[in-house]
Structures are given as structure tokens and as C-alpha cells.
Amino acid sequence: MPILDERTLRLPFPTCSSPFAEAAEVHVRQWARRFEMVRGPESERRFAETGFGICAGYVQADASSAALNVYAKWLAWLFLVNDQHGEGVYETPETWLGAVRHLRPVFETGEVDNGSASTPAARALADVLGHVYPVMSPAWRKRFSRHCWETIEAVVPESDRRRRERVPGVDEYISNRRLVSAGIPLFDLCEFMAGRELPDDVREHPAYREMVMAASEVMAWCNDVASLEKEEAAGEVDNFVLVLEVAEGLDRSRAVEAVVERVRHRVEEYLLAERSINTYLASRAPNFETWRVVDYCIRSMRHWMVGNVRWSQLNPRYTVSQSHRQRSRPPHVVDLLSTRAG
């Protein structure tokens, strides 16, 4: 954590938090119990310590109370389902793909139909999407569903490399990490949070696409620094620090500094893209609502980059446990992708 304190937090954005964060924290804990995303005292304790409502408050500081509750549930769902792979419940490519396949129709329709496996993850996902999909266009829903599924599938090469203990090359790592970090669907959801969809010409503009990519990478690479010790203890190889150690022959401290320097550079590229999209908007003189939704999405990306780091400092998610050292399933992780309880 000292690395985050001294270096990564020097991002050129203020740290903000929603006044509704504490209420969102209460809401998401109740939701997790109701949908059996947590089961038992150890699972509930860890969930409460992690603080998904607090995280939502940092990364969506401008959201309404109702929208923040939805985002907190989405964050909790993403992290807990990702833990099904990362914490050793479904740790091989085969078991992971077999376990998550029933989620695809839920992403596509927003519902758990009678023919789908009814798991805690499926039911909780349908609940979240039930707030989102009715107010978003079919095109947005299709795009969001595709991006979410790309995130889920991106776990497969990570899992395969972990099994073979093969550290990826730099380009290989960056392209897959961008997907597995879920940055793209997280930023898709900013349009729901803003209460209006981006115009197609803005969303597809090269500058806006660059903003999404840059913000996603800043978020992911800062996370790599925060989670380095935990991931190394668990046998993970897809961490930018470990990748640069191998690719550039660096020792640990120099590899960390190299990641931090790449974060700084990516922030600079993000700011250039942000200026470009504002110049483009000014040239076409959009109406107030277009300005408002673009401004909301821009502020959300800024909040995400710095807020993710602040949240990482405040919770025990990235501490190394005995379970990680032994590469075994931690006691707080419950199976969310099976119809069997527990």
C-alpha cells in the first residue's frame, strides 16, 4: 500500500465521494444477503469489510441515490463473480466456461427464464439488469451485453497462463487486461447513471474511445500495484509488475516504478483525448442534454481513476492470506455459479 500512497495517488484529479455512499453500503449488504451472494458469517464479514457501496460512492460521486444503489450492486456482482475464478472455485478454463454459460442469456434478456439455471449469480444479475435494461435502448443493451461477455471470456487466457505458469508478453497482457478489468462495461453503465445515452457520433468518436481505453488501463494497472502481493502469492501471472519484470529484466522496485510511469503517461493521453472530445462537441454546438451526459461520463472516468485507488487503500481485499499462500479457496468465498447451496 505505501506505493499507492506515495506515487499512484498523484493523479491530476480530486478525490470525491457521494453523500449517498453510506446508504448505498447498507443497501448493497441487504441485497447481497437477499440474493445469497453472501452466505455465512465469514462471507458476510468480508463483504462488509470490502465496502462496495463505499467504492460506488468514490467512482460515481455525482450519481443520484437510487442510481448509486444500482451501481453498488453491479460492482459487488462483478467482483464476487470474478472471485469465482480468481479465488479458486472455478480456476481452470474448462470449469469457468462451464460454470458461467448460463449467465449469457441473462445478459441478453435481463431475465432468468424458466429454462436457465437459477443460481445466486444469475438471480442477482437479473435484479441489477432489471433496473437498467427497461430505460436503455435495445442497441445499448446489446452493446453492454457483448462487452460484459467479452470480459467473462477474457478470463480464459488468464486462467490458462496461470495453469501453465507462463507470464504474458507486454502487448498480450495489455490487450487482455483491458477486457478482463471490465472497464468498458463499467463505463457503458455511466450512460445509465447519467439518465441518457451518449449520441452515437460521440460514443464512436476516436477521442472518446481513447478516453475509455486509457481510463480502463489506468484503473487496471493501479489495481495491479495494489494487488501484487496477493496475486503473486496465489500464483497469478497476469499482473503488469510481474509482466515487466520478465519482459524488461527489472527488479521488483523498478518494475513497480515502470508501471507507475506508464500510469502517468496513460493519464496524459486520457487528458489529451478529453480535450479533443470537448473540442469536437464545441464544433457541433450540441444541446444542453448532450453536453450534460458527456460531462457526466467524463467526470465518471476521472472519479474511477482516482477513486479506485482510494478504495483499494481502505479495504482488506488485497491483503495476502494463508489461503492465498497455500493457493486454496479462502473461507469467505462461496459458490455463486452452482444451483447447489453453499
Image (cartoon, rainbow, N blue to C red):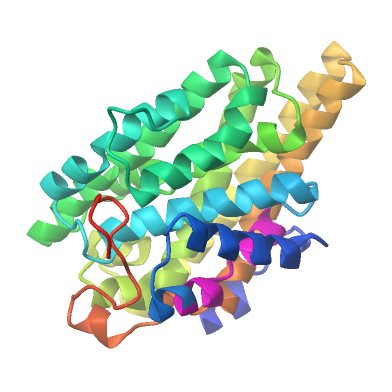
Task: Name the residue: 8% across, 58% down.
Answer: 164
Q: Is residue 52 above or below residue 150?
A: below
Q: Position of residue 137 (x, y in %)?
A: 61, 17
101 to 308, vertically: above or below: above
In the rendered structure, the answer to whether residue 228 lies left or right of residue 248 reads right
Res. 262 in view? no
Q: Residue at x 31, y 49 (%)?
A: 173
Q: Position of residue 30 (x, y in %)?
A: 58, 63
Quadrant position of residue 12: bottom right
Q: Quadrant of residue 17?
A: bottom right
In the image, taking residue 9 as reference, residue 125 lies left or right, namely left
Q: Work out which residue is located at the far front of the displayed protein and give it.
A: 114
Left/right placement of residue 25 relative to residue 147 reads right
Q: Nearer the viewer, residue 164 or 3?
A: 164
Assess whether residue 23 is covered by the magenta stretch.
Answer: no
Q: Position of residue 298 (x, y in %)?
A: 73, 39
Q: Which residues are magenta?
A: 45-59
Question: Quick check: 304 above or below 307?
Answer: above
Residue drawn at 51 percent across, 37 percent down = 185
Quarter of the image for the C terminus: give it: bottom left
Q: Is residue 53 magenta?
A: yes
Residue at position x 75%, y 35% in the image: 194
Number of dots carrying numbers: 0
Q: Position of residue 94 (x, y in %)?
A: 11, 45
Please tell me in which quadrant of the rendered image residue 314 appears.
bottom right
> What type of secondary structure mainly makes up the magenta span?
helix
Query: Would residue 279 be seen by someone viewing this image from the given angle?
Result: yes
- Give 37 or 81, whichever is nearer the viewer: 37
The residue most toward the left is: 164
